Image (cartoon, rainbow, N blue to C red):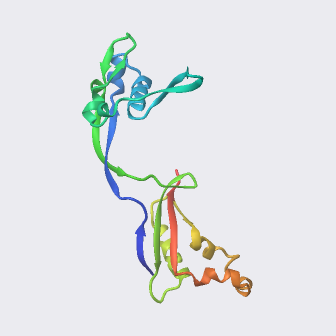
Amino acid sequence: MVSDVYSDGLPEGASIRLDIDRQKAEALGVSFINISDILSTAMGSSYINDFPNEGRMQQVIMQADASARMQVDDVLKLHVRNSRGDMVSLAEVVTPVWDETPLQMVRYLGYPATSISGSAAKGASTGDAMAEMERLAHQLPPGFAVAWTGQSFRSASPLLRHPCWWRYPSWRYFWCWPLFMRAGLFRCR
């Protein structure tokens, strides 16, 4: 019924997750907010304020120097202030963990999703191929749903399948395009 079915997007790749030991951080007097702030500022940036410079307002943006955030060990050398005013190394409360994670986060209607593309097998109609994809999707665990997009959405619409649309040449392109479908699988929580 279907052929050339594949998942769009990027494969999973290596990434790093920083696990924060909240109990140890609390024992050292370091708040989670301070750890989060220092990591956000070091890896991204933080707006500090504005200052006048030759008649123009300039922004002050803080960020760790590129050499201080290129390697995981460099980030772990950063320090965060605890409740007593002392500096605590991030390495004391943060553990790096290498993991395989999606390199691309896809969403459809706000839900995490994956996009699946394919075409009807030789001798099969687009409708049969779409019905087969829906049948296969219904075998997934509870919480998954199927939504058609693009040409498949138009093909699946009962209104556009009505023969009265065939009288108008401008609508015939729905039937002349290559038999190609696109579905989005998304998980409902």
Is residue 44 placed above or below 118 in the rendered structure? above
| Residue 69: percent from left, percent from top | 32, 34
Find residue 170 and report its image quarter: bottom right
Q: Residue at x 34, y 22 (%)?
A: 25
For the image shown, how many numbered marks are present on the structure?
0
Is residue 21 placed above or below 86 in the rendered structure? below
Q: Is residue 77 left or right of residue 44?
A: left
Q: Residue furthest front?
A: 54
| Residue 55: percent from left, percent from top | 60, 23
Q: Nearer the viewer, residue 16 or 171?
A: 171
| Residue 109: percent from left, percent from top | 58, 55
Q: Residue furthest top?
A: 84
Any part of residue 161 in sight: yes
Q: Is residue 52 left or right of residue 164?
A: left
Find residue 97 and report its image quarter: top left
Any part of residue 143 in sight: no
Q: Residue at x 53, y 76 (%)?
A: 130
Q: Is residue 49 left or right of residue 90?
A: right
Q: Residue at x 37, y 17 (%)?
A: 81
| Residue 188: percent from left, percent from top | 53, 54
Q: Residue furthest bottom?
A: 123
Q: Is residue 11 left or right of residue 47?
A: left
Q: Quadrant of the N terminus?
A: bottom left
Is residue 148 placed above or below 76 in the rendered structure? below
Q: Residue at x 48, y 55 (%)?
A: 106
Q: Nearer the viewer, residue 129 or 39?
A: 39
